[in-house]
Image (tube, coloured by chain):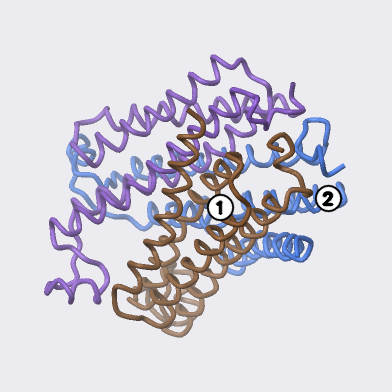
Chain colours: A brown, B blue, C purple
Amino acid sequence: MVANMMSMENPLFKTYLFYLCVLGLKMLTMSILTARKRFLTKTFINPEDAISMKVKVKTDDNVERVRRAHLNDIENIPVFFVVSFAYLMTNPAVGFATMLFRAFTAARFVHTFVYAVVVIPQPARALSWGVGYAITWYMGITSILNLL
Amino acid sequence: MVANMMSMENPLFKTYLFYLCVLGLKMLTMSILTARKRFLTKTFINPEDAISMKVKVKTDDNVERVRRAHLNDIENIPVFFVVSFAYLMTNPAVGFATMLFRAFTAARFVHTFVYAVVVIPQPARALSWGVGYAITWYMGITSILNLL
Amino acid sequence: MVANMMSMENPLFKTYLFYLCVLGLKMLTMSILTARKRFLTKTFINPEDAISMKVKVKTDDNVERVRRAHLNDIENIPVFFVVSFAYLMTNPAVGFATMLFRAFTAARFVHTFVYAVVVIPQPARALSWGVGYAITWYMGITSILNLL
């Protein structure tokens, strides 16, 4: 079974590809959120953008908050992409692995929501980050033990 | 055909690997561009670097501009790496997929050029970013629909 | 041999997966290092975090140093993930490729250590960064030449 792990006949590989795309497009959406906040608050970091909007270059915490949420995605999601790929190769139970993919993805959407869309007091942000973080560690450690 | 998608006998897989490397090395080149701007403007962010150059720690917008171009690569290119991998598995027409890879890569080079090498007024930067962005969304949506 | 490159019967593919996980978990550890520095220096960037610790939002160079080390990982390690994947497909000698994976990984650990754990004067940081950088370029150029 491992030999054709990376085949469209393997439902877990299809699940993996599906969540790659969902999480990738979720990350791209952060650029739209940032641009929206920039235009709403007329906050631009490049002189050529500020001039065209007839404002001065400045920063705004509402913009920076979305950028921090984006950076948090950049810190966590690409690592998940590669670690979950290694995890797939350990031939995990399909149902359990699918649940981990769903939980990671849901946690990342919740993280962005409570961080940058509607600011919800802690520990909402810490918990949603922690779920994704713990799942990635679990997959990484499981894969390393399996590869030794 | 899908079964041996990831084989060196598949010309589209070779195209994919080729653009992975070109885009990866392009991203690494941003570090050289940043270092060059740092030395030209004597702008260092680490005290130990500033001291060795006999200057104080400071920031400079020419350096920050290159760093923003680099960050934009980091926001967009790794997502493309994974989404285009999923797209490959949908068994697209080779000629069309190759064109998308070329267009994405060209757009990212143009983006860096107009953002950080020779600053060209908008909409040059927005358009070049938008081409890569739209291609990634197209590949992602196509892949998701194909995987459902 | 290339046809089943991505199989658990291929020792080099297992080596690749192993270092994916080690480097991925190393990157995740940067978040812990940052959080530790934040609590030690009571430095928070989000108002909701600062309020719960009864301090004002501020920045601190010890925190920023860890964040710069993390950003340097983000700039270099994901590129290595994809370029080394392409390099694997060129069917390199197993011993040599394994040595490159080990050297890259060791260099990244040293980089973080001398940058953000115990600050060691230059050229420690430049050299450790340079080893990883040179290995990625070597793998990228070798892959491109092999794919042409």
Q: Is residue A14 above or below residue B12?
A: below
Q: Nearer the viewer, residue A112 or A15?
A: A15
Disc 2 marks which residue?
B91
Chain containing mark 2: B
Residue at 60% from the left image edge and 58% from the top image edge:
A98
Location of residue C98 in the rendering, given as x and y in whole percent from the top left corner: 52, 20
- Foreground mark, 1 or 2, reads 2
In the rendered structure, which amino acid carries the disc numbered 2?
A: Asn
Q: Nearer the viewer, residue B46 or A49?
A: B46
* Along the viewing direction, whichever of B43 and A23 lies nearer the viewer: A23
Indicate which disc, 1 or 2, sits on the residue closer to the N terminus: 2
Tags 1 and 2 both on a single chain: yes
Q: Is residue C19 above or below residue B139?
A: above
For the C terminus of chain C, give its image quadrant. Answer: top right
How far is mark 1 from mark 2, CA to CA?
A: 31 Å
Query: Residue beneath label 1, please?
Result: B112
> Which three-letter amino acid code belongs to the residue tagged 1?
Thr
Residue B87 x %, y %? 74, 54
> Residue at point 72% right, 34% down?
A3
SS under mark 1: helix
